[in-house]
Amino acid sequence: MEAKFDVELVKDVKFYYPPPEVKEKSWIKDYSVAYQEFLADPEAFWEKMAQELDWVRKWDRVRVWDYPYAKWFVGARLNITHNCLDRHVMNHRRNKVALIWRGEEDEERVYTYRKLYREVMRFANGLKKLGIGKGDRVCIYMPMVPEQVIAMLACARIGAVHSVVFGGFGVTALNTRIVDADAKLVITADITVRRGKTISLLPIVEEAIVGASSIEKVIVLRRKSPQSELQSGMEVDFNELMEDVENFCEPETMDAEDPLFILYTSGSTGTPKGVVHTCGGYMVGTYYTTKYVFDLKEEDIYWCTADPGWITGHSYVVYGPLAAGGTVVISETTPDYPDPGNFWNIIEDLGITIFYTAPTAIRMFMKMGEKWPNGYDLSSLRIIASVGEPLNPEAFEWYYHVIGKDRCPLVDTWWQTETGMQMITTMIGEPMRPGFAGKGIPGVVADVVNKEGESVAPGKGGFLVIREPWPAMLRTIYKNDDRYRKYWYTIPNVYTTGDLAVKGDKGYIMILGRADDIILVAGHNIGTAEVESALVSHPAVAEAAVIGKPDPLKGNSIKAFVILRVGNTPSDHLTSEIIHHVRMTLGPIAMPSEIEYMEKLPKTRSGKIMRRVLKAKEMGIDPGDISTLEE
Ligand code: WTA
């Protein structure tokens, strides 16, 4: 793949053409052929994919679609960890490296498939000892360490449903998620390490489980020395739990439609949505995309920088790449510590071949300058990829030229917590268009439509929707099926993504961003309602509204408009106090970067805050139709 790609520029429309050998060497030889094969017989297409994996019992039917509910691989039985572990241990991958962890100070831990398999089974037996079994919900609140992956797989081994909560969330955010899921157990660590400092996690858990009556135990990975004290009775040491247990743990046989995990994502109302994914379809979807979108081969060293606390980590750190038998790198480090060469150093050091990161990181690297990546040998890279928010053309060009050196396909993957797997991208070997994620992958029918669900013409914008069910789609919102139905009934007969998009020519789709009250901050979904309720829980705040304000690095930053309770006056001190309060409640990712004090907030007659008006005012644009505005 040494040849550089051709570039074609017609009337401002730019395409990069990969040389033909890229296609010839990739799993998908031809996107159009594969797509036609899918369209001709969708069930046969997915069945063929599922055949590449191991099942305890095969399906009676590939798909049953009873709008808006889909079932996949109906009647099939399996355990996903058998496909991620046992399957490889039984073949030539037994001693292949499954997981490489990098910490700060060049710390490194390596797990072969066999070692990971043993650790997962021992921990699974430990969970059983605590009385955890099939269907129980387990909350995992951990830093990015191998034990986080082990904990997830151990739950899946015994059929317990994990709910991973990102380690950067604060007390209230964690509490809400534990309570909603009725979790019996929290698995955590005493500390997380960041930029040479340690941050305590355990006190957050201890506060978050107050009033969470479902919690029976807390498992703590103790990393600090001297060791942190544990509360007797309630808290159990991670490693001690693995002592005196059998090395082998039979995988629980799961129905394809049994839940595998719940993952909370922000919604338009205050409470986050527990997105439910199931065992069979999710496994097939993540396996297929890891193999075909990333073109994962036996010898690849694959690094996805996402935390398993997000869906990207679930699908493309843990389940997809392990099901495909890949070598996965995880790193508990930040891009710019000890210096902005950290990521490039890891790529050179480990010989990373596939690199998957987020636009916000790419834009930060752009700002730091080319000298950092140029100081390292990045020639091992063969595919570079992006996810989480729109990859703007400038960031695309930089990533493609400076990191990919004009010879690596750049796959910008659009998908969501709800979709479980990648949905829209430019498949390897296809011409790439900066600013455009691409098209539906084979297996996915994506479209841009108007409110009535009619396709818009090329060059026009509208709502991004998916027209057909797909195996890794969410099955429901935990304990709130009405919220699930909304995805399929907002526009009839299609799945509404909540994103706005533009259809370009040749079917390429440009993603513009969210159409609803979710703000993408550095690629993380933050619900305006959740931040607003954190703000009003501060004693000085009477009312609050937040908006996303364009930010050159993070995509958006959070700006809050606040009305104070009588007797309080705005001051810098109060501003930092309120911001700190949100930090403690929801975590640093949801912190407003700016607060403006107001006397009144623009509202509709029915009392709903019109964030659109605040945003338009902030950006100096016409707020459009504000006829429902009262004040
Ligand atoms: C946005 C992350 C543009 C989008 C996997 C989506 C993107 C939301 C892209 C889901 C992309 C994700 N280009 N926008 N390549 N990927 N998004 O649930 O707004 O954390 O709806 O899933 O991120 O975020 P989530």
Image: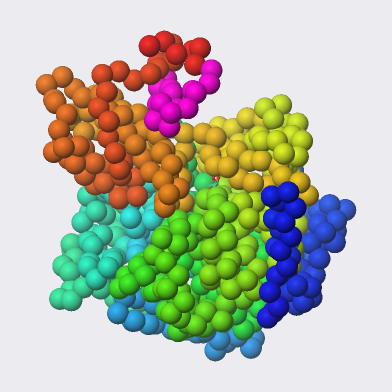
Which residue sits at x=53%, y=39%? 514
* Picture coordinates of residue 224, whole percent (x, y): 21, 73
In the picture provided, is 615 more to the left or to the right than 236?
right
Using the rendered image of the protein, determine whether residue 99 is visible from the camera's viewpoint. Answer: no
Q: Is residue 246 magenta?
A: no
From the image, which quarter does the C terminus lie in? Answer: top left
* Picture coordinates of residue 152, whole percent (x, y): 46, 65
Which residue sits at x=24%, y=71%? 196
The answer to which of 273 and 236 lies nearer the viewer is 273
The answer to which of 519 and 130 lies nearer the viewer is 519
Bounds of the magenta segment: 608-625
Residue 48 sits in quarter: bottom right
Q: Which residue lies furthest to the right in this view?
A: 40
Question: In the rendered image of this protein, does residue 514 appear above or below residue 382?
Answer: above
* Picture coordinates of residue 259, whole percent (x, y): 56, 53
Which residue sits at x=62%, y=76%? 382
Residue 189 sits in quarter: bottom left
Question: In the rendered image of this protein, does residue 190 appear above or below residue 100?
Answer: above
Question: In the rendered image of this protein, does residue 470 appear above or below residue 566?
Answer: below
From the image, which quarter does the N terminus lie in? Answer: bottom right
In the picture provided, is 228 more to the left or to the right than 195?
left
Residue 455 sits in quarter: top right
Q: Residue furthest front?
A: 11
Which residue sits at x=62%, y=65%? 410
The answer to which of 480 and 7 lies nearer the viewer is 7
State the colouring used for the structure image.
Answer: rainbow
